[in-house]
Structures are given as structure tokens and as C-alpha cells.
């Protein structure tokens, strides 16, 4: 059950990145009303799946769709 809930969050995070890119981890956490670690984990998993890319900008990770 926890995994299903997490998959739902990942789907919403992906939709947010598609609509509002570029986004930061903090932005995702705040808008999705999840803690920072959950947002970061979702973003890293989406990156591992090749759905988004992350890059460091001024010490922060910014997330965008692949070109």
C-alpha cells in the first residue's frame, strides 16, 4: 500500500515538472505538501528512469525534462 501511494506521488511530481520546469526539490516539496526527502527521492527515481534530468545550479539541484 505504501508503494502504491509513493507511485501516485511520483506521477504527480512528474506532472509538476512537465508543467512548471525548471523546478527545485524545495519547490516540489512545498507544492506537493510532502517532506523534502520524499520530494528528493521521487526526483532521483524519475531521473533514474530517464524521465527528467537534474543539474546543479548555485549549489541547488534544478530538475527539467530531457531535451
Image: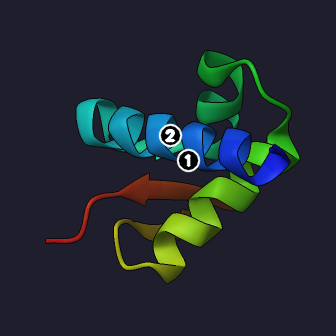
Q: Nearer the viewer, residue 59 or 38?
A: 38
Q: Where residue 30 sits in the image (x, y, percent)?
A: 69, 20
For image coordinates 60% across by 70% down, the residue present is: 45
Q: Is residue 16 left or right of residue 4?
A: left
Residue marked by disc 2: 13
Would you place residue 47 above or below residue 2 in this image? below
For image coordinates 78% across by 28% down, the residue present is: 34
| Rendered image: mark on residue 36 | none
Residue marked by disc 1: 10
Q: Nearer the viewer, residue 38 or 67?
A: 38
For image coordinates 60% across by 33% down, the residue present is: 28
Q: Quadrant of the C terminus?
A: bottom left
Q: Is residue 17 left or right of residue 33?
A: left
Q: Where residue 27 sits in the image (x, y, percent)?
A: 60, 29
Measure the C-alpha gap from mark 1 to mark 2: 5 Å
Q: Quadrant of the N terminus?
A: top right
Q: Is residue 22 visible?
A: yes
- SS category of the residue bearing label 2: helix
- Say whether marks 1 and 2 touch (CB < 8 Å): yes
Q: Is residue 58 visible?
A: no
Q: Is residue 43 left or right of residue 53?
A: right
Number of residues whose C-alpha sits closer than 10 Å to that of mark 1, classed few (under 14), some (14–19) or many (20 or more): some
Q: Where residue 13 sits in the image (x, y, percent)?
A: 50, 40
Q: Where residue 50 sits in the image (x, y, percent)?
A: 36, 79
Amino acid at each position: 500500500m505504501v508503494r502504491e501511494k509513493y507511485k501516485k506521488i511520483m506521477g504527480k511530481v512528474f506532472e509538476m515538472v512537465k508543467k512548471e520546469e525548471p523546478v527545485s526539490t524545495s519547490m516540489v516539496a512545498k507544492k506537493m505538501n510532502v517532506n523534502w526527502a520524499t520530494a528528493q527521492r521521487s526526483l532521483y527515481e524519475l531521473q533514474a528512469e530517464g524521465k527528467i534530468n537534474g543539474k546543479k545550479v548555485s549549489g541547488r539541484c534544478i530538475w527539467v525534462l530531457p531535451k
